[in-house]
Amino acid sequence: MDTETDNSESPVTDSIQSRDYQIELFEMAKKQNLLVCMPTGSGKTWVSVLLTKYYLPTCIETTKKVIFLANTVQLVVQQYQYFVDNIPSTSDKSHVSFFVGYMDCDNWTGEKWQDMLSQSEVLVMSTEIFLNILNIHCNLSDVCLIIFDECHHADKNHSMNRIMDIYKEYPKERISELPRILGLTATIIKGIPNSKIQDEIVRMETTLAARAVTYHQYEKILKFSTKAKLLEMFYNGDYVNIRQEFSDYMTLSMEALLALNVENDEEQNPEVLDVRFKHNVPNSKLFGRSKSLPKVLYNYLVILEKICKELGPHCADLGAAVLTISVSRKLMTVAKGTNKCTFYQIFRTMMYQFMSIYPRPSIHDISPKLKLLVEELRKRRPMEGREDMCGIIFVQRKLDCQAIHHYLQECIAHYSDLKFLKTQFITGVEKDFENPLEVEESNNRLIRHIISQFRKKKYNLLISTAVLEEGLDIPSCNLVIRFDNVDSYRSYTQSMGRARNETADFLVFVDATDSARQVALHQKYRQTSVELSEALASNALHLGDESVEIVPRIPELPPFCPGGTPESPRITANDAIQVIHKYCMGTLGPSTGAWHNPVSWFEGELLNYRAFLVLPRNKRSKLHGKIEGEFMTTKESAKRAVFLKACKKLYEAGAFDEMLKPICLDKIEPKILEFFEEEDHNDENLSTQLKGWTSKTYPKSLSKNICPDEPAYMYAIELSLISPQGLEKEKVFDYSNRRYTTGIMSSTSLQMIPVFKLESSMGALRVELKDVTSTCRIEKSEIELSRIYKFQRHLFAGVLKLNLKCTEQGNKSPLLIVPLRINKTLAVGLNYCIDWDIISSLDKEFETASPGEKYEKFVSETARQVPDEKNPHWYSGDAVVVPWHGSRQEFYCVLEVLKDMTPLSPFDNLKIAATFEDYYKLKYNVNIVNRNQALLRCYTLSSILNYLQVKTNEKSNVFRKIGSSSVITLVPELNRLFPYPASLYSQAKTIPSILHRISRFLIAMELGRRISGTTGILQRPTYKVSDNWAYNEAVEMLSMNSESGSSNNGVEAVYKTLENFTQSEKLIPNPTITGSNSSLDSMEPLWDVDIPLLFRLKYIHPHQVTVEQLQAAVAERFPSRGQISLMSGYESQMSKDLNNTDGLESLDKDTGIDTKSQPPIYELLEAITLAKAQDRISLERLEIIGDSYLKFTTTLFLFGNFPDYDEGKLTELRCKLVSNNQLRRLGKKKKLGEILSGGIFYPEFTFLPPSFNVYETAAQVAMEVGGSMNIFNYLDELKLKGMSFEELKKVVDPARSEKSAPTRALFGYSKLKEKDIADCVEALIGAYYTTGGQKGALALMKWLEIRGPDVNGNPISYGDWTMPPRRKIDNHYVKLTSFLPYLKELEEFLTYTFDDPWLAVEAFTHPDYYPNEITDSFQRLEFLGDAVLDFLITNHIYKNSDAKTPGEVTDLRSALVNNVTFGSLVVRYGLHKQFLYISRDVAKSIAAFVNRQELQNHEVTGQFKLLNEKECPTALDIEVPKVLGDIFESLCGAIYLDSKMSLDTTWRVFYRLMQAEIEKFTKNCPKAPIREIMEMGLKPEIFTDTRSKSFLCVIRFNGKEYRGYGTSKRSAMNAVAKFVLRIMNQESVESP
């Protein structure tokens, strides 16, 4: 490709001047198909641009296309950019677009293709892509011009040739519809031309149906192309410097590798990995067999020997070092003990031995050929008047490239006259299936980078293979050297074309011993160029004489074309293989197509071959069994014939559509999709700010207001510290000698509210509502009620200072707060009455000022309050005082009167002041009048109002630590007595939290009634121990009302209230029966030498037992089976007898679970409280078990009702049924969003006191502008009242908000996400499961209307688990053991005997294992076992981890339920040895992982592989092969089905296998590495490589950048996170 030097340095359309020959060739191309042949650099591409511009108006008018085709991705991108630069675009679109493989074009739908093709008129793409879409998404009649770049490649089965085959098959009567053809090439002759030039031209003309031409005045073209002349440089080829010992060693090494190659039958047939089914392919060889590894290594030795002869011992030593490093790197990726590992080790030893023959060869130990190269380079050193060197050295072999580069680097360091050289080498892309990510990083990107640096002159000499001969855009060179023989005319012309500089030299190294032949060949090349240019120029002169006849090629196998017309879709024999592979990868399996490749082989010999094909078995497959092809003359044609036959059969079976594309069978039928409800569209018209806001419901039981003429209830709040520490400040909550308490007057009985806890800075508080109705005189006339309503405002706005600007007070409320005075009488004991004196005192306090504003900055000496006997409240121990001298208003509770201290006493800090009197004079400039008054010991009363949170939350300012500085000494004279006793003031701070908790309890009770009214589950008192505190619930049996409110049975009874427990030793035990935690160490060992070490439990050190001893023991018991491959064994600490695990809780019988009762009230409250509410309770724990049970029940439902669905469709359907969207819809139907506590409890912003109502318009505006009520603080209260929504929205200014406020909770509203309601649904399921077992959970799910569709889309409730019937199989032991020869040992290991042993076979059968035609593959069992195992493990964790937080439970579940753990256990116990599969890639991934696990002593741990530990450390995540985890899950599914769906039996088997990890992780649960990193404040950055579909994650730590690669974002993040954590651990160990 010659775009850079076509016509100018900067190819912009307006500045390019077309040359005469370009214009003439353009005019020719307008009239006839042309094959333009001109030297590199002469401007061929510009001719295509001119022709494209000519056709562009036609394309715009008719929607036809211009297609430009290139062979590589890099050329496509390069040519696309050239066309974009030279074809002007319009203001709204570009006329040019490009398509390459990494854009995932192969998976585009027809609609996607039509959309992409319609966007531009000029389409630049690879030839393969155009071939794939031709006659499917694009017809030749839709194209007006096709341009073939580097068209000399159109030969044999090249995609260019296949495109032209379709072109030539067009009917003659429609030939006018065919597009114009333009071919571009520097040469149309390949190899050494033995035939006449004209014959070669005719061959290319026939292939491309175009006339091959060049400009008739060829000498004009040469002015713009290379002017270099071939200079032959002769060297002595008789150089021999090989020691005899080296020659002998090389001979022996080659013989050894050839012997290994003959013996390596299994490596010769890598797809055949299991001898158990080789009898199915008798005397046959598989297709796709790559060259054996010993043969590859042998070829390396041959190359190394040639390097030694041609370059000398020094370069051979460098080559051996390169090979040693490469082989050592590959050894890191292969499994120990395999043939591949052995071969690599042998070869590395050979390299070490070879390098020892020539110890440290001198830099002068080189061949004359290499010396000549060095001398020629010396001549190019910079001199005055000489242009700086820019050169390329072409060599044939990749190893030569690296050896010469490294040698020149040594020379640069050693010789001063070579320091001007800046060398680099390019060898092209070498396939390396061991590490595709590393190959992608070190080849494609590296090549582009090197060429870019070469263009910028940072390199001035490239050593390259033929990869730089054509295509890639490189600058004009003034030196091109052909270091090896020029093996073809094409290489001669293309490499010479790189020497386009005016003073360029083209040097060809010639062996003097073969100079005559080489010089003659060069002369022939020169003569060919002359003859070719003359012939092409003659063609140009006689262009109009005749046109090229379109001669269709008759293929050996006619294409499959059901339509029969030229425009009909077709599948050719060449396309058939690719079509079948796409069908297997896309339709039959996941994107990991290596697991679903077809298997083919051939039979016959001597021009008579027949091929066979077997497709993977799958529920979706339309074609089963072996397909036999026709006899053909070659193996390749036989293979194509059988694949083409498979395409025909698949089309006839309905697997292909009319476009001959595989029909996607993984889509769920429309009638089943109709089961799922449509999306909610209620929020579409809302603004972004209003979406998600949900109105909160209030308890229906509080809908009745307190009326003067109706009875009411009175409850005294009893508040106390649960665990007092004897601290002085704890007197604030000591009510033993207080005369006051706070009462709640209610229109509804609150008897069912249990004892609950609040959190304070001094510890947990116990709260109980004591019914004092019978002992309290309740005065509630209209006058008295009006005084109480006024008291509400004084209390909440004045005392608690709540922001009530956006609210208005009414005269109706179901609850009212009143101060109660406690009286003690001998007859009755304690009785209570409303203290009207305190109500009056607060009236007086706030009667002349707005709440909170009566605060005097200074009190005159005469007006000061001095304590005396007339004012006993000062010394009652229940006083609240307020200093008047400070800058802000503070409230203090008097703890003690210090009678021995006066203002003249020494001050607490003598450095500040000598006495208290001096301190106040210096600090506040206040004189103390009474110097003899006793001082007060006081405690600062906190302004905190949220007592529901456990931990300090600095961001929300909910709690703050109150230390010893909270207790201070005050002078009474400088304070005023607040008219509200301390006992009431301290309780008042908790009232918002208490009322909030009461409301939430009532909502939870009403939810329980709604559920019981439908399901019939009774609601009765239950008890739960949480955080070592018994939440005492009242025992009143409520009527079971339906949702409509009608009573079923009425109130059955009211039971006596349970005794209140205040001592920890009286705590109510949790009735839930948990699994046994007893150790199993005393159990009888499982392992002995009689059982093969196919299954291993504990590592046996090699010094303890020998392999020979084990082999002998096995052979003694199984003499007919021969030796079994043994690896390091494991010894069990568990018993063979299943009864030893009887301590585990039974799941089949729901032991200890009451299926007739609802969850405790407190558990229901947990289920409707989100974690984001930051309450001391949340739904997280219940959501974990509920999520797992929902997944389990949904899996059982789908497995039984969809027997024909494969694992992929079952998984997709399950995802839809348990998705957040689906659960949210169901939850919204039951109005769960209205009862969810979804925001932090901010009493200052979200709490509405009794009798208060919020302005609805104010709440709406607050939601609209972001969720803060502070936006109204600066507005006059009178302006808020009566303003409309639009009016209020105009006057508010969010920027003037005084401080940040919650964004998820407002008065009467909360903001919820879709997941919040879904989590609530799962938590409710979890609550009913933990109380009522599976029956309780299923009843709740029925109430929620959680159902699934049947095969016709009709809804069915869960619960009736009907498993699909299994096909009856003749249980013939010999036939069964041909698949599982160690079935008996497997059963002994599992301590479980299969009733249906074919389930075990199915559990170990991979989809590609076609010899098993009896059972399905493991996929459906894996789908079932995944859910069963997840539920069993989650249930065990939940019931045995009461002390763990929800986050810890989640971490523990994640650590146990994942592919890493399951896969590691499979390898530890040797279960992978039973796996039935064929795929070579699966075998390699399993072998690599087994090797790594053995190095890790079979620890379950995350791993990563370091790629580069130098300046930029890079790690690649080692992912456990998914099939290993699938085996574990499918085995679980098999045992579950075989045991008649017994969870107990299944868990006993798998608990034994996982017990070690369960106990280990329970004690010290590993966190996800990326989570640890993020908790440290490190932020990973993710980058996507669309070409390789890989991901790069970067973390910057300690000034250094660390990188991780992976096939997914998660694996890339895990790789770098684990690497950084390891670095941190190393640094912490090394630091003193």
Image: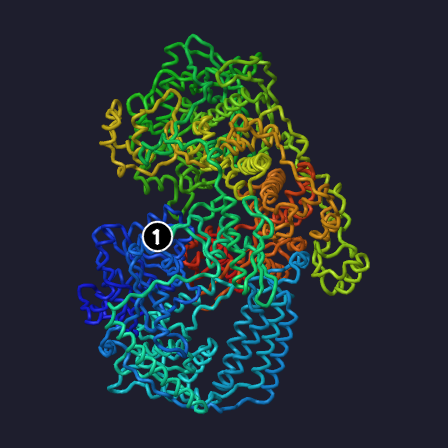
**Side (left or right) of 370 relative to 1128:** left
Q: On the image, which quarter does residue 1315 sit in?
A: top left
Q: Residue furthest top?
A: 709
Q: Residue at x 60, y 32 (%)?
A: 1330
Instruction: Specify whether 439 is left or right of 143.
Output: right
Q: Nearer the viewer, residue 903 or 1504?
A: 1504
Q: Position of residue 1236 (x, y in %)?
A: 45, 30
Instruction: Tell me if residue 1223 comes above or below residue 522 in the rendering.
Output: above
Whether residue 1472 sits left or right of residue 1133 in the image: it is: left
Q: Residues within 10 Å of mark 1 (few under 14, many from 20)?
A: some
Measuring from the top left, give residue 1365's x and y in whole percent. 65, 36
Identify the image quadrant of the N terminus: bottom left
Residue visible at 81% across and 56% down in the picture = 1117
x, y percentage for residue 1260?
31, 29
Residue 337 visible within the image: yes
Q: Is residue 1587 above or below residue 305?
A: above
Of 266 and 870, nearer the camera is 266
User: To which quarter of the image does residue 875 belong?
Assistant: top left
For the residue pair 186 and 1525, the one nearer the viewer reads as 186
| Closest to the observer, 1403 or 544 | 544
Helix, strand or loop at mark 1: loop
Question: Which x, y percent locates residue 1124?
Answer: 73, 60
Amino acid type, mark 1 = Asn
Q: Which residue is mark 1?
A: 139
What's the colour scheme? Answer: rainbow
Does residue 986 appear in this view? Answer: no
